[in-house]
Image (spheres, rainbow, N blue to C red):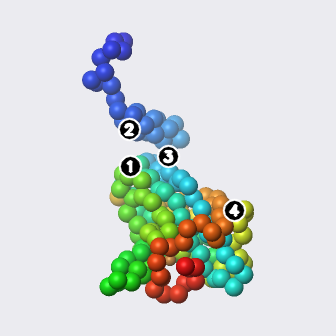
Amino acid sequence: MQPRITAFAPSPRALFSAFAALLLSLAGAAAYAEVTVADAWARATVPQQKASGAFMTLTASTDTRLIGVSSPAAGVAEIHEMKMDGNIMRMNPIDALALPAGKAVELRPGGYHLMLMQLPQPLEAGTEIPVSLTFEDAAGQRTSLDIQVPVKPLTTPAHGSSSGHGHGHRH
Ligand SMILES: [Cu+2]
């Protein structure tokens, strides 16, 4: 080995891909997109509040889309985007959120978020809620990922501006 010749050293990304490929072959599984979730949290609610948001950073190893979300803590869960409508910021459900390979996509207050609606009971700060995410890669292969999302207090900064359709976000 000639460690001083660095020009041909594989990039960390190539190494990671090789490692992932090795793991997959060891597992004997079909190749599937791997999605990393970081900094997940959901906003706590007060008793009469029936909706809240969940936020996180998603990074997919290959071009992938987030196509679904569900949680036993919510009767209905949707993927939402925030969009300017004239000069009012509104949120809308979207069918899918693109996760380009290697790019960290941030779901945050005022931006893309997971909308948790028809909450059977308040989300209490200090607890965790299970959330299931469904992804589809470029080949149409679907995978789901179950995560535990910590619930954080209402005082965490809210959506940047008014929401359009009264889901009960607090401003
Ligand atoms: Cu929303």
- Crowd tier of the residue under label 4, counting other residues whose Cα lies within 10 Å: few below 14, some 14–19, many 20 or above: some
The quadrant of the image that shows the N terminus is: top left
User: CA separation, marks 1 and 3?
Assistant: 21 Å
Mark 1 C-beta closer than 8 Å to ligand 1: no
Q: CA distance from mark 2 to mark 4?
A: 32 Å
Q: Which residue is mark 1?
A: 102
Q: Amino acid at mark 4?
A: Glu
How many other residues sit within 10 Å of disc 1, few (<14), some (14-19) or many (≥20)? some
Is residue 53 something that shows in the picture? yes
Residue indicated by mark 4: 128
Q: For mark 3, give the secondary structure.
A: loop
For the residue carrying disc 2, how many other residues have a C-alpha within 10 Å: few (<14), some (14-19), or many (20+)?
few
Q: Nearer the viewer, mark 1 or mark 3?
A: 1
Disc 3: which residue = 29
Q: Residue at x 46, y 78 (%)?
A: 161
* Amino acid type of the residue that numbered disc 2 sits on in the rendered structure: Arg
Residue sitting at x 55%, y 68%: 157
Q: Amino acid at mark 3?
A: Ala
The mark nearer the N terminus, 2 or 4, is 2
Q: Residue at x 36, y 15 (%)?
A: 3
> Considering the numbered disc 1 on the image, is that residue within a helix, a strand or a loop?
loop
